[in-house]
Amino acid sequence: MSGTRRLREAVRVFLEKQGSANTVEIFDHLNNRFRWGATMNQVGNILAKDIRFDKIGHTRGEFRGSVYTVCVWAINNDASVVMSQ
């Protein structure tokens, strides 16, 4: 199966608990949660390609000492119906 299964599951649990989070917050959570962590490319691909996650907007703020615009993500409630069938 997928090489990122544990990461995807951790993102799902995190977003269910938080409600919504930006890409940097999810990246930091994964890297604190797992010893081996994840790259930003992995996190971006997980969020963009998994139908369980929905991009709900953008936020501009200071991350890692510079100002970036990052996406805000939440659980896609419509996907849970598709995944359970």
Image (cartoon, rainbow, N blue to C red):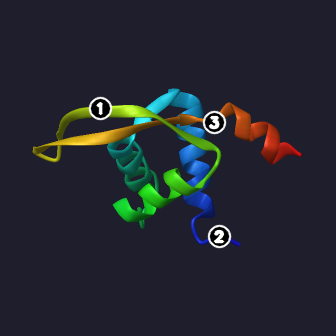
Find disc 2 in the rendering and name its residue: 2
Which residue is painted at 55% across and 39% down in the image? 54
Q: Position of residue 81 (x, y in %)?
A: 81, 37
Report how far apart the C-alphas of labels 1 and 3 lie in the structure: 19 Å
The answer to whether 85 is drawn above or below residue 73 in the figure is: below
Question: What amino acid is at disc 2?
Answer: Ser
Nearest to viewer (mark 2 / mark 1)? 1
Q: Secondary structure at mark 3?
A: loop
Q: Residues within 10 Å of mark 3 (few under 14, many from 20)?
A: some
The CA distance from mark 2 to mark 1 is: 30 Å
Determine the image quadrant of residue 8.
bottom right
Q: Could you tell which of marks 2 and 3 lies nearer the N-terminus?
A: 2
Looking at this view, name the residue that lies furthest to the left: 65
Task: Name which of mark 1 and mark 3 comes first in the sequence.
Answer: 1
Mark linked to residue 59: 1
Taking the spot 79% from the left edge, 47% from the top edge, the residue there is: 83
Disc 3 residue type (three-letter)? Asn
User: In the rendering, at what x and y percent does residue 3 appear?
Assistant: 59, 72
Q: Amino acid at mark 1?
A: Thr
* Res. 60 image quadrant: top left
The answer to whether residue 80 of the structure is visible from this angle is yes
Lower position in the chain sequence, tag 2 or tag 1 = 2
For this rendering, which residue is in front, 82 or 21? 82
- Please tell me how crowded label 1 is: few (under 14), some (14-19), or many (20+) other residues with Cα within 10 Å: few
Q: Residue at x 34, y 34 (%)?
A: 58
Count how many numbered circles sit on residues in the image. 3
Is label 2 or label 3 in front? 3
